[in-house]
Image (tube, rainbow, N blue to C red):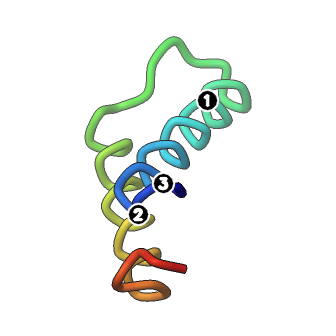
Amino acid sequence: MGKTNKELAIDIAIEYAHGMLHINGTDGYPVEDCCEVIKKVYETLESLDPDGKE
């Protein structure tokens, strides 16, 4: 069984944060930025697959 759009959004946000930390070389990533990534990715996934079945 595949992941839900919520689970995918979290996974993508985690990888995005890892990438940003690697690129910027900082010790932290603002929670607000991470939350915004999760929201945007989730909204995008829902617009592409609102039922989460594809």
- Of 38 and 6, which appears nearest the observer? 6
In the picture of the structure, the residue carrying the numbered disc 1 is 18
Badges 1 and 3: C-beta atoms under 8 Å apart?
Answer: no
Q: Crowding near pointer 1: few (<14 within 10 Å), some, many (20+)? A: some
**Mark 3, secondary structure of its residue:** loop
> CA separation, marks 3 and 2?
7 Å
x then y, percent, for residue 31: 29, 33
Amino acid carrying label 1: it is His
**Mark 1, secondary structure of its residue:** helix
In the picture of the structure, the residue carrying the numbered disc 3 is 3
Q: Earlier in the sequence, mark 1 or mark 3?
A: 3
Amino acid carrying label 3: it is Lys
> CA separation, marks 2 and 1?
20 Å
What number is the disc on residue 44?
none
x then y, percent, for residue 23: 73, 32
Residue drawn where x is 55% and y is 49% of the image: 12
x then y, percent, for residue 16: 59, 43
In the rendered image, the quadrant that contains the C terminus is bottom right
Residue drawn where x is 45% and y is 84% of the image: 49
Q: Determine whether, in the image, residue 25 is placed left or right of residue 44.
A: right
- Of 26 and 35, which appears nearest the observer? 35
Marks 1, 3: nearer the viewer: 3
x then y, percent, for residue 15: 61, 38
> CA separation, marks 1 and 3?
20 Å
Answer with the quarter of the image where residue 44 lies.
bottom left
In the picture of the structure, the residue carrying the numbered disc 2 is 5
